[in-house]
Image: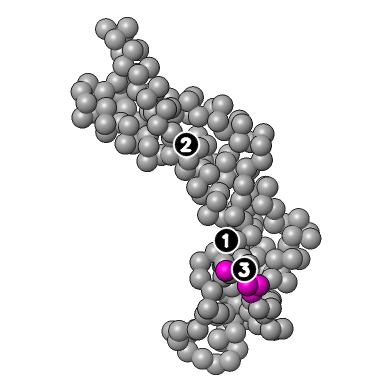
Amino acid sequence: MKAPQSLKARALQLLAQRDQSPVELRRKLLARARDLARQASGTVSGEVVAGDGLSGDAALLNKPVNGMPAPPDPPGSPESEVDAVLRWLEEKRFVSVERFAEARVNARSPRFGNLRIRHELAQHGAVLSEEANQALVASELDRARAVHACRFAGAPSDLKQSARQARFLAARGFSADVIRRVLRESARDDDTAS
């Protein structure tokens, strides 16, 4: 039987695949650490493990809830082991929120609007720098035009088609103002081509 992979090795393996946010990496490593702890204690892997009473991002980030500081994790607990690995990764600059945000924007911007990109970053606890935010805002109209042209052959022929195209662009996270401009330009271009 193969020896279980250490948390540090698992973290490096995950980071080798793509940049990970600290929140995302903590969630994945915590699941692995709890599995390792269950295996070491000899419990059945299908057994439910009681949580720490925290829920959502507060549990992931171990931040205060309702103004009360979170209790420190006991030494040797899966949470403290994961936090130690994350600190080591941050010290070695293997994990960077800024680098994660930049990579996510570069990967998502050709297909998605600002609203969707910002929402995804917020889920990962990352925020765009002011320069990156300005560049994203400046390029949103051009990106929406490209996505629209790739998906639809031409301008909407009636209100039903217009609503369908607007819903598609809205689902991709483009703002209402940008969607109106793209559809207006598409109709105007279609009229001049006729």
Which one is in front in this view, the residue at disc 3 or the one at disc 1? 3
* First of labels 3, 1 by sequence position: 1
Tag 1 residue: 24
Q: Which mark is residue 67?
A: 3
Q: Residues within 10 Å of mark 2 (few under 14, many from 20)?
A: many
* First of labels 2, 3 by sequence position: 3
Measure how far apart labels 3 and 1 are at the Cα level: 24 Å
Residue 77 pos. (x, y %)? 65, 82
For image coordinates 48% across by 25% down, the residue present is: 141
Give amino acid for label 2. Gly
- Pick out the residue farthest to the front: 67
Quadrant in which residue 84 is drawn: bottom right
Which one is in front in this view, the residue at disc 2 or the one at disc 3? 3
| Of the pair 14 and 158, the residue shown nearer to us | 158
Q: Secondary structure at mark 2?
A: loop
Q: Secondary structure at mark 1?
A: helix
Q: Residues within 10 Å of mark 1 (few under 14, many from 20)?
A: some
Give amino acid for label 1. Glu
Q: Secondary structure at mark 3?
A: loop
Assign the magenta stretch its main secondary structure: loop
For image coordinates 37% across by 41% down, the residue present is: 171
Tag 2 residue: 113
Horizontal side, residue 29 vs residue 89: left or right: left
Horizontal side, residue 183 vs residue 159: left or right: right
Q: Do callouts 2 and 1 mark residues in contact (Cβ within 8 Å)?
A: no
* First of labels 2, 1 by sequence position: 1
Residue 112 seen in the figure: no
**Region in magenta:** 66-70
Give amino acid for label 3. Gly
152 is higher (above) or lower (below) than 108: above
41 is higher (above) or lower (below) than 123: below
Tally of numbered tags: 3
